[in-house]
């Protein structure tokens, strides 16, 4: 081989080597793959963190709502248990809604209460899977929520029974309660049932079950269903202490011009019928061991009188063919209470067979002031006047209003100028 030819061969081989790029792609791929994997791993870690944060937010949202909704009938300014009850409810709701894998890395929830607002904060440190390769071992997660409730108003007519008849308004009653509300704990259909040609002017209604209104009736627009069950607003009331012994035994009377009655303990009940007029002098009438039955052919009157109904009274009937005008005591244990019985344990859960009947009827004019509190009774009120008047509130297991009257509730204020009537809440919402 000649030297020239040999030189050309070596030259060609070196040229081939210079232009040959086989193997360089593998080097580039190896260099770029690491940051790509880290980026993909970081996206994976971020996705896990976002899902965890969403679960944490759901938990604190539910917790804040639960805390705000707990014990809504409490006086938050004065009841020492109110804050504790709301804090407990909020923490239990976090526990119930937080998945185990998040609960293991989360700190204890922090609950702050400011007035009626409940704020829940939840923090967690989530370990990373890929970001730790670049020095990020954990990700800090934080979720917060604040809930509050709106005090809707005061309920003038309250039906406590979940299993009773709720509130029924029928006939051609024109019911005016101004800014006050109707509230029914009945859990089934027709919790509030408006039938006939009734007209109702009210702030609104709140019912646990559904509301039914006939096509011929005219009612308020604000009808809220699915409400919370209202606790008995007078459950803590201390009833009056009856005098020792019996003032009267099985007191009854028949026909006559008129009769005047005096306060005391009426053992065996009080039953009157056939008088042209019945008048009650001021004081408290303790009825025990029998029915309270008053039927008059004329007027039934009484100023500053209170009827306290004992546990063994089977029924209440007040029926005046003419006017029925009664006002409650202005002082003492029965202050502002016209007809009342002792609070009933678990009054909400009473069935119809547990109840006594209570019927009040004014043939000409029905003018009743004060509070009627009968948690263990199915109450019926019927008026037939164009100017009937009721007191500040009615609280019973169920309430039925009927007749042809214009039945108006008088707004009464307490010593602080606040409306008398069960305050309640219909809206619990997240505010931030």
Image (cartoon, rainbow, N blue to C red):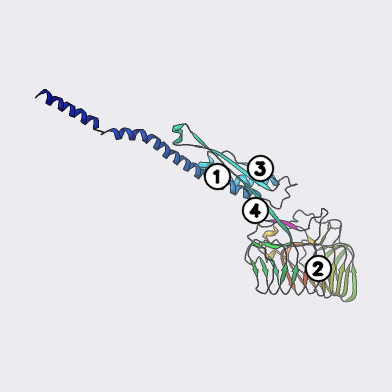
Give SS at disc 3. Answer: strand
Residue 356: x and y in percent read 73, 66
Residue corresponding to mark 3: 112
Would you say residue 261 is visible in this rendering? yes
The first of marks 1 and 3 along the sequence is: 1
Distance of mark 1 from mark 4, alpha carbons? 20 Å
Magenta residues span: 410-427
Nearest the eye: 370 or 14: 14
Would you say residue 309 is visible in this rendering? no
The first of marks 1 and 2 along the sequence is: 1
Residue corresponding to mark 4: 428
Distance of mark 3 from mark 4, alpha carbons? 17 Å
Give SS at disc 1. Answer: helix
The first of marks 3 and 4 along the sequence is: 3
Extreme residue toward the front, this view: 4
Q: Dot 4: within a 10 Å radius of its alpha carbon, few (fewer than 14), some, or many (20 or more) residues?
A: some
Q: Dot 2: within a 10 Å radius of its alpha carbon, few (fewer than 14), some, or many (20 or more) residues?
A: many
Q: Main secondary structure of the magenta part?
A: loop
Nearest the eye: 19 or 202: 19
Residue corresponding to mark 1: 56
Residue 168: x and y in percent read 69, 69
Residue 28: x and y in percent read 33, 34
Nearest the eye: 136 or 371: 136
Circles 1 and 4, Cβ within 8 Å, touching? The answer is no
Q: Quadrant of residue 279?
A: bottom right
């Amino acid at each position: 081989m000649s030297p020239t030819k040999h030189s050309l061969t070596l030259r060609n081989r070196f040229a081939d080597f210079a232009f040959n790029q086989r193997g360089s792609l593998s080097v580039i791929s190896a260099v770029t793959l690491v940051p790509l994997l880290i980026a993909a791993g970081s996206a994976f870690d971020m996705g896990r963190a976002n899902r965890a944060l969403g679960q944490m937010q759901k938990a604190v949202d539910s917790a804040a709502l639960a805390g705000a909704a707990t014990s809504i009938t409490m006086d938050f300014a004065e009841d020492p248990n109110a804050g504790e009850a709301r804090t407990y409810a909020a923490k239990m709701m976090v526990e119930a809604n937080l998945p185990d894998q998040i609960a293991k890395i989360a700190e204890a929830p922090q609950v702050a209460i400011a007035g009626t607002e409940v704020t829940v904060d939840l923090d967690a440190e989530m370990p990373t899977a890929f970001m730790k390769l670049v020095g990020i071992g954990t990700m800090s997660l934080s979720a917060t929520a604040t809930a509050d409730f709106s005090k809707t108003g005061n309920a003038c007519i309250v039906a406590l029974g979940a299993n009773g008849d709720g509130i029924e308004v029928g006939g051609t009653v024109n019911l005016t309660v101004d800014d006050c509300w109707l509230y029914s704990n009945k859990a089934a259909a027709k919790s509030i049932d408006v039938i006939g040609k009734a007209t109702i002017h009210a702030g609104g209604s709140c019912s646990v079950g559904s509301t039914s209104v006939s096509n011929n009736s005219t009612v308020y627009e604000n009808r809220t269903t699915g409400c919370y069950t209202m606790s008995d607003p007078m459950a803590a009331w201390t009833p009056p202490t009856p005098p020792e012994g019996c003032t009267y035994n099985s007191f009854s009377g028949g026909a006559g011009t008129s009769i005047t009655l005096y306060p005391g303990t009426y053992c065996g009940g009080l039953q009157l019928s056939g008088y042209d007029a019945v008048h009650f002098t001021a004081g408290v009438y303790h009825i025990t061991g029998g029915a309270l039955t008053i039927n008059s052919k004329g007027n039934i009157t009484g100023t500053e009188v209170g009827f306290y109904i004992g546990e063994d009274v089977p029924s209440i009937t007040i029926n005046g063919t003419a006017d029925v005008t009664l006002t409650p005591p202005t002082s003492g244990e029965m202050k502002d209470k016209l007809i009342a019985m002792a609070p009933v344990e678990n009054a909400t859960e009473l069935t119809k067979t547990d109840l006594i009947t209570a019927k009040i009827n004014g043939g000409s004019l029905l003018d009743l002031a004060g509070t009627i509190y009968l948690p263990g009774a199915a109450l019926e009120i019927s008026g037939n006047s164009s100017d009937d008047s009721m007191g500040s509130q009615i609280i019973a297991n169920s309430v039925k209003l009927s007749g042809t009257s214009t039945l108006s509730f008088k707004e009464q204020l307490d010593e602080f100028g606040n409306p008398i009537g069960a305050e309640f809440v219909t809206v619990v919402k997240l505010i931030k």
